[in-house]
Amino acid sequence: MEGRQETGKESKPSSVSVDLQGDSSLQVEISDAVSERDKVKFTVQTKSCLPHFAQTEFSVVRQHEEFIWLHDAYVENEEYAGLIIPPAPPRPDFEASREKLQKLGEGDSSITREEFAKMKQELEAEYLAIFKKTVAMHEVFLQRLAAHPTLRRDHNFFVFLEYGQDLSVRGKNRKELLGGFLRNIVKSADEALITSMSGLKEVDDFFEHERTFLLEYHTRIRDACLRADRVMHSHKCLADDYIPISAALNSLGTQEVNQLKTSFLKLAELFERLRKLEGRVASDEDLKLSDMLRYYMRDSQAAKDLLYRRLRALADYENANKALDKARTRNREVQTAESHQQQCCQRFERLSDSAKQELMDFKSRRVSSFRKNLIELAELELKHAKASTLLLRNTLVVLKGEP
Amino acid sequence: MAAEREPPPLGDAKPTDFEELEDGEDLFTSTVSTLESSPSSPEPASLPAEDVSPNSNGPKPAEVVLDDDREDLFAEATEEVSLDSPEREPILSSEPSPAVTPVTPTTLIAPRIESKSMSAPVIFDRSREEIEEEANGDVFDIEIGVSDPEKVGDGMNAYMAYRVTTKTSLSMFSKSEFSVKRRFSDFLGLHSKLASKYLHVGYIVPPAPEKSIVGMTKVKVGKEDSSSTEFVEKRRAALERYLQRTVKHPTLLQDPDLRQFLESSELPRAVNTQALSGAGILRMVNKAADAVNKMTIKMNESDAWFEEKQQQFENLDQQLRKLHASVEALVCHRKELSANTAAFAKSAAMLGNSEDHTALSRALSQLAEVEEKIDQLHQEQAFADFYMFSELLSDYIRLIAAVKGVFDHRMKCWQKWEDAQITLLKKRETEAKMMVANKPDKIQQAKNEIREWEAKVQQGERDFEQISKTIRKEVGRFEKERVKDFKTVIIKYLESLVQTQQQLIKYWEAFLPEAKAIA
């Protein structure tokens, strides 16, 4: 199925917006996207007056795997160990939607042509919504990179934005995926090990607090996100239920010969319109609540990763101290041990400083994003409830006025 | 049937007929007299009552013992009526104030039939019509409530007793407000009696709520969970609707069994209603036999109205079933939504607790509270979806089954008439053969049989015409009720939806400033 999308800044359904801090020296957006059978091709457009680039305005076509490559490049770069790396965008997943469309096509002969058309319309809208979301996620990823004073200067980033050819980045094969999976396990094991290491004291209250906070927060936000997804799903089912109800009321109305005719027909119309409203409630909940929770779930994971790296650096520092002491007692290779210890100390302090800043930024980003989305959610819910009330009242007036 | 029939007051009728009529008279007398005492009924009903009643017992108490003779009785009684109906009806209905002397109906009838008719059935019919006229004006002053389900007994012998409260100003009842305790099988027993009396002559008897072995077993076993309370509530509401529909029917309201059910403190236990009893099995066998018969009866429909109506009801049935299935899905999903919203509310509260930014934390807790309230809303709406919309549809699906049953009875009635005609033909052939063979004693027998079957053919025709007439009227009444019912419920249901939306507005309006307060 083909889908094209022109993203203007206003039509962004994104629940996460990136404040470019008034810096227009590097503007990145996804100006177009095409969905082909298996993949989505994003057109990444850059506007920049930075001297590094050959042109001031240019665009390239990128696929999801290339975004992942870019993300991994950042994560593996020691220079950025003290920063929160913006979470990678999730893989475009149209499987579920495609399956549903296929099932609809295979056909349930008991539904009328109208019902079929409506259900198809619904599924197509769903497909389009998923498509828009994936574009938004990829765009936000790039925009956060572009907004970050350090990350935006990365060489790989420039390559990603500018290099006209295919980056020859294939998707991870099974071995690499497994490798990644194992790495995560090693990381968590390592973290557990470090924290239980005797003598490793967290010197800074700030980080102590952040660690406890982030651990709990991450779990809870993940929970909230899952449950918000379920609410949204139920709402969608409810809206879809109105389709056969409306159709059945319609056929009842057309068959009746008495005064119930208008009642049924009016009711059919009502349910059709209520369906659209319910559908909008569902999709707004999805965007303003589910998506936001999901994004911050990933972002908080990135923050946790930062804390882990700092902790690792602290452990390294501690180890270097111990090695130095040992070297001094043995009076052997003191010089190397000293410089190593010096390095570790500097690294640790560098990480701590930037981590502190990053975590405070994370908090303010989070607070403002939640604020914006909760306000918009409430306003939209109000809007839809008022529209529904009006619709219902009008129908009641008509029905009551009947003889 | 004798060609000459004399009105019971003269006391010349044949013994058997007389007896049957007598029973009928009693029945009519009791109803008629109560009508006379009822403020809403017309006066003249009283006059003929005195003339007609052979025993002049005056009003009989409500406890009239009814037996199977009743069925033939009705047929006989209504037979008189049907012969005049085309002429009589217009005259009667155009007279809202029934200041008609007893003489008038008789004289009207006399030229038409060989025998003088009983005025009683005439009056019965007239007063029934008058009640109907008043019903059209909605002066049926009777209100039924079913409440307070109470578990009686323990273990597998336990049952639920429901309080049936009647409020009425009709004077056929001894009090204006009274209540009794009834159990589910009592309701089934009532329906069984009413059905056996009225269904086969064309009255649409509202069906009783369905049995549920699973549901009841849970209650008996004493599971005090929400599903068994829901089951009991569902049943209570269904029983209430069943009674309300039954009393709305002008003919059924007159029935002494119904009155006994509503009024008397002790009711003989209806054991034949149990699914696995002998009677239950018999019922199932009969139902199967009926289904087979239906397929084999090929009726020559002379009246397009019936064919049209049957088709209409068939369509309506299909449509309602489809709608019902969709509404059931809606109820299910709304309940799911409610559960999911509750779960989300909890996790939002937890998230709010972990959040270390104070204002955001507070806003998240507020969000959790809003979602909890919304969960309640969804639950209530799901109840409304179910009790108003879904149950209305399932009630009507079963009512239409009753309507179809009535049409089927008409078919059977026709078949009976048809069979009688065929038998008569055969008897005539036999007679002819006997005449040729010159066997005088056999000839006499044949002649007797011919007379017998001629009467049966006539009876069959009259029955058929009567049931057709009754069905026409019943269908008209049913359709009127249906329109009213649907309209009322639809409006109520929409109002519940409006309520939900208004509450939503209230909740979100309260939340908005909290969200804005995040700094």
Image: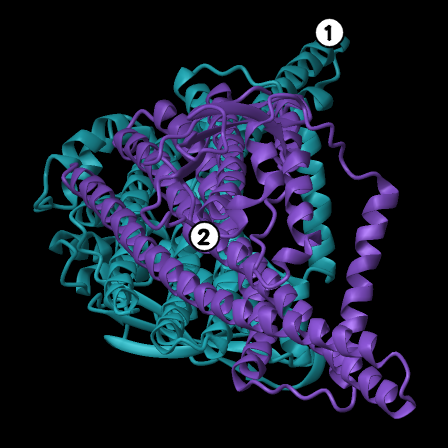
Indicate the secondary structure of the residue bearing disc 1.
Answer: helix
Position of residue B91 measured from the top left corner of the image (x, y, whole percent): 15, 32
Q: State which chain disc 2 sits on.
A: B
A34 vs A384, left or right, is right
For badge 2, the amino acid type reads Glu
Position of residue B13 measured from the top left corner of the image (x, y, whole percent): 41, 46
Q: Which residue is located at x 32 percent, y 33 percent?
A: A264
Q: Nearer the viewer, residue A139 or B354?
A: A139
Q: Colour of chain B?
A: cyan
Q: Which residue is located at x 28 percent, y 30 percent?
A: B84
Camera-nearest label, 2 or 1: 2
Q: Which residue is located at x 60 percent, y 28 percent?
A: A62
Q: Is residue A251 above or below residue B129?
A: above
In space, the residues marked 2 and 1 are separated at their CA atoms by: 67 Å
| Residue that carries the numbered disc 1 in the rendered image | B436
Whether residue B461 is visible, yes or no, is no
Position of residue A182 measured from the top left corner of the image (x, y, whole percent): 84, 58
| Residue that carries the numbered disc 2 in the rendered image | B391
Indicate the secondary structure of the residue bearing disc 2.
Answer: helix
Whether residue A395 is visible, yes or no, is yes
Q: Is residue B148 above or below residue B257?
A: below
Q: Nearer the viewer, residue A367 or B125?
A: A367
Q: Colour of chain A?
A: purple
Q: Nearer the viewer, residue B461 or B274?
A: B274
Position of residue B30 measured from the top left corner of the image (x, y, whole percent): 31, 62
Quadrant of the rendered image containing residue A283: top left
